Amino acid sequence: MTIPVRRIAAACALGAALAACGAPNTPHAARQAHPAPTGAVPSKPPTLAPGPAGLTPVFKNGPRTRDKTVALTFDADMTADQGARAAAGEHFDNPRLISTLRAHKVPATVFMTGRWADEYPQEARAIGRDPLFEVANHSYSHYAFTDDCYGLPTVPEDRMRSDVERAFAAFKKAGVPRAMPYFRFPGGCYDQRALRTLSAAGVTAVQWDVVSGDAFATDADAVAQQVLEGVRPGSVVVMHCTRSAAPATEEAVRTIVPELRKKGYRFVKVSELIGAAGRHR
């Protein structure tokens, strides 16, 4: 995602196009994933049923129940035109963050761009093969699917679906065995045209209800405080797995995880929240 929290707040206040600020909160029916018998092919992950007129469904948070679950999600951002910056030594990965999540046994969903997987195939493969994590789609190019989305270049409408499919192909090439059918719009920006265009891709769009503010932040305590103050049962927290653009994230996570556990929260992947949404229709 990689957009500063102040800009998000301003966009919400002004009613701008960032969909997470004004995304419909009407629950959709979830397609249940049932446990597979031993030795059988794993069942399909839970997804939301299409929205009105077959539009791509949008998921923002799980049920607000006594089961205090929360999903930490991390956007592994790399834009298609940033290859020269990576070659010059800029780090778009964050292996220390992944190590910290493993050390604290925190399940998480990583929304990865295809370009990131191309740049860091070994890390993409390791994340995708670790049962603690699930890999989801954040587009190939990290170009916006709407106009005027935080200065990002825009994907033409006739290339939106292929950009998503190209990311899935990049994950497969890197060795990710089972990418999830979830998609996060770059910048969080979407509109009816984008939802209609992606309907044939068969993905559930995943937004969030808690903005961590870690993009470009250097104060880990401030990031942690913002998350701790925003989390409610069923929350989806958006953070980043990009050293250069979110240097304070790993340190913030080391505060967030024990504090939320003290409050009785259990960390889950997005797939569990989507499955829970179906059980609480």
Image (cartoon, rainbow, N blue to C red):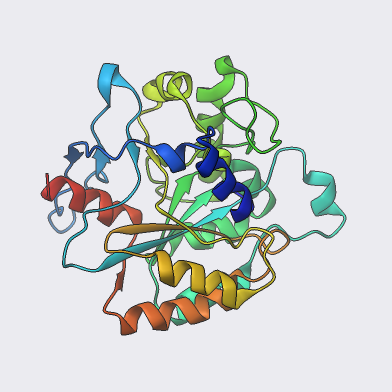
- Is residue 267 visible in the rendered structure shown here? yes
Q: Position of residue 70 (x, y in %)?
A: 33, 64
254 lies left or right of 268: right
Residue 31 placement: quadrant:
top left
**Placement of 231 over or under 197, stated as above or below:** below
- Is residue 42 visible in the rendered structure shown here? no
Residue at left 50%, top 35%? 15
Residue at left 18%, top 56%? 39
Residue 232 placement: quadrant:
bottom left
**Placement of 201 over or under 30, stated as above or below:** above
Q: Residue furthest front?
A: 14
Residue at left 70%, top 58%? 245
**Placement of 164 over or under 246, stated as above or below:** above
Q: Position of residue 175 (x, y in %)?
A: 52, 51
Q: Position of residue 164 (x, y in %)?
A: 51, 32
In this rendered view, identify the residue nearer to me: 225 or 161: 225
In this rendered view, identify the residue nearer to me: 189 or 93: 189
98 lies left or right of 153: left
